Each structure stands twice: as C-alpha cells, then as structure tokens.
Image (cartoon, grey):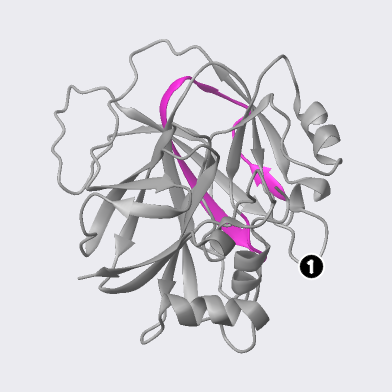
C-alpha cells in the first residue's frame, strides 16, 4: 500500500511552489448537499461536512464525529503531496495496531477496511469525498512515500471515532455520472460535461480500486502522460484534481469536481492483489474529454 501514490506524488512534488492558504479551521459542520442538477427542500436532512487538513506530516481533524452520510473536505497544505485515505479498524484494533501491521511487508491486514476518502490534489487545493459512516474506530492515513518512508511512518496517521448519531442522516448525493471500476478499467454511464459535477464511483471488481483524476495539459494525451511518468523529465504534463482513494469491492462513494473543457486522465495506482503491480500496468487508465 505504501508505494501506490509514489508516481502521482512525484508529479505534485515538482509543483510544490504553489502558494498555500493559511489559517484553515478544522471542524464538523452541517451543509446542504447541493449537486449541480438537483434541488433540495429546506426541510431535508443535512449532510454532515468534516473539514480535514494535511501537511508535513500530520492531519488536523476532529477526534470524533457522528455516524451517517459524511462529506470529507480535505485541504492539502503541503508542501508535499498528501491524500486522506480512510480505513475502518474492526476486531477492536487501534491505530497502534495498524502502524505495527504496516511495518511488515504485504497487503493491509484483513481487519483494516479501505473506505476511500479524497484522493490526491495539488498542494494548496482541496479534494472531497462523500460516504456513509457507521459507528466504530477509523483511521485517517497518508500512504504517500515520495523519496523516502511513507508519510504514516512520519506521523501522518490519526484515529477517528465515529459515534451513533442523534438525528436522521442526509440523503445520498445525486450523481451526474456513475464511474464503474473493474479489473482493469473505468466505465462511465454518460459523458462528463463541463461544470461542477458529482461523480458516483462504484467498484464492481473483485479487488480494491481507486480513481485518481488528472487534468491533462493542453495538447497532452493519456499516452503522453504515461510516457512522461516513466522518466519524469521536465514539467509535469498534468495536474492532480482528487478523486476517490482505495475502496473495496462492492463499495460506492461520491466526489465533486469543477470540470473545465479539456482532456482528463483517470488512473488506478493501487497494487494488484495477485502480482503486486500497480493497476495502471494492467491497463487501468482512461482518457475522457470534457466539453
């Protein structure tokens, strides 16, 4: 798991001069979930918003939140690449147990379930993910390992306790498009149009998958981008815009992004459960055109 974001991390690492806004607060708020093509009545239950920041090398986030539909808004304060992967710790395990288990080579232990979360975005920018949380123990974690040990070994892992909610949960977001993940590709239910769009990500494959969204530079194709990653010489020909971190088979999650007209790449960097190679090696990449 620790090496799955190395490549995209190096892309953003070369962009570390981006100015980062200071003084962001971290708290739980309630906000109406308002997709671009949906209307919501004033009496509808509200989706809970949890604001999280990541920097070298820590998370700033609440220690405890209520269960239910939750939108995580993750601000990468950098200067390095960070993402906010979320794990649910079962069988009474703790973050200390998780760190001990990850010190050994291999896959995640069976009691640590991958629940997605906002994937990598450029330093100074925010990514988001919406999912339903049940009561229990969780962990925020950053698996990025740019030129050294993964960030969780430097302290970028934080426990989260989810407690029973006292009121009703908000409705699930209304998606503009569904992106289905499988071994080894992405399938969209409809073209992604320009504007603020909510994407439902559904993993139908037999193993974990992720969506890393990259906005390609003008005139750059997915093939050009993948070729650049082989040597990483010159400026990066694309900009990470978030997406959904690793989710298990059968899970669904949502993210919202502002799409401007142009070309975008979707890439899965997670290691295959059989051979350990990144899924993009098996062909799990796709280019889409937004108009």
Q: Position of residue 141 (x, y in %)?
A: 67, 42
Q: Residue at x 44, y 31 (%)?
A: 250
Decide if residue 245 is in sight here: no
Image quadrant containing the C terminus: bottom left
Q: Position of residue 220 (x, y in %)?
A: 41, 84
Few, some or many C-alpha atoms within 10 Å of disc 1 (few <14, some 14-19, many ≥20)?
Answer: few
* Horizontal side, residue 282 vs residue 186: left or right: right
Q: Quadrant of residue 173?
A: top left
- Between 280 and 115, the residue placed more toward the observer is 280
Q: Residue at x 63, y 62 (%)?
A: 81
Is residue 22 one of those drawn in magenta? Answer: no
- Between 81 and 284, the residue placed more toward the observer is 284
Q: Position of residue 162 (x, y in %)?
A: 56, 20
Q: Which residue is mark 1?
A: 147
Q: Residue at x 23, y 41 (%)?
A: 34
Q: Residue at x 63, y 28 (%)?
A: 63
- Between 10 and 165, the residue placed more toward the observer is 10
Write down the region rendered in magenta.
Answer: 58-82
Is residue 64 one of those drawn in magenta? Answer: yes
């Amino acid at each position: 798991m620790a090496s799955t974001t190395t490549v995209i991390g190096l892309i953003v690492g070369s962009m570390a001069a981006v100015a980062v806004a200071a003084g962001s607060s971290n708290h739980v708020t309630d906000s109406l979930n308002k997709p671009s093509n949906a209307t919501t009545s004033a009496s509808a239950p509200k989706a809970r918003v949890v604001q999280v920041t990541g920097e070298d090398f820590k998370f700033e986030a609440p220690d405890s939140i209520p269960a239910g539909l939750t939108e995580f808004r993750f601000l990468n304060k950098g200067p390095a690449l960070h993402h906010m992967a979320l794990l649910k710790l079962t069988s009474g395990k703790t973050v200390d147990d998780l760190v001990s288990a990850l010190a050994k080579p291999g896959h995640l232990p069976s009691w640590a379930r991958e629940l997605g979360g906002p994937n990598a975005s450029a330093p100074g920018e925010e990514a988001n993910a919406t999912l339903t949380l049940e009561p229990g123990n969780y962990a925020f974690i950053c698996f990025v390992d740019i030129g050294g040990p993964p960030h969780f070994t430097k302290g970028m892992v934080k426990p989260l306790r989810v407690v029973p909610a006292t009121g009703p949960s908000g409705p699930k977001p209304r998606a503009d498009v569904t992106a289905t993940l499988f071994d080894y590709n992405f399938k969209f239910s409809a073209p992604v149009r320009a504007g603020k769009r909510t994407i439902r990500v559904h993993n139908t494959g037999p193993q974990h998958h992720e969506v890393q969204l990259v906005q390609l530079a003008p005139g750059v194709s997915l093939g050009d981008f993948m070729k650049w990653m082989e040597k990483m010489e010159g400026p990066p020909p694309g900009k990470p815009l978030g997406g959904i971190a690793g989710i298990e088979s059968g899970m669904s999650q949502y993210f919202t992004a502002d799409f401007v007209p142009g070309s975008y790449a979707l890439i899965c960097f997670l290691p295959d459960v059989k051979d350990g190679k990144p899924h993009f090696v098996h062909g799990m990449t796709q280019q889409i055109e937004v108009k």
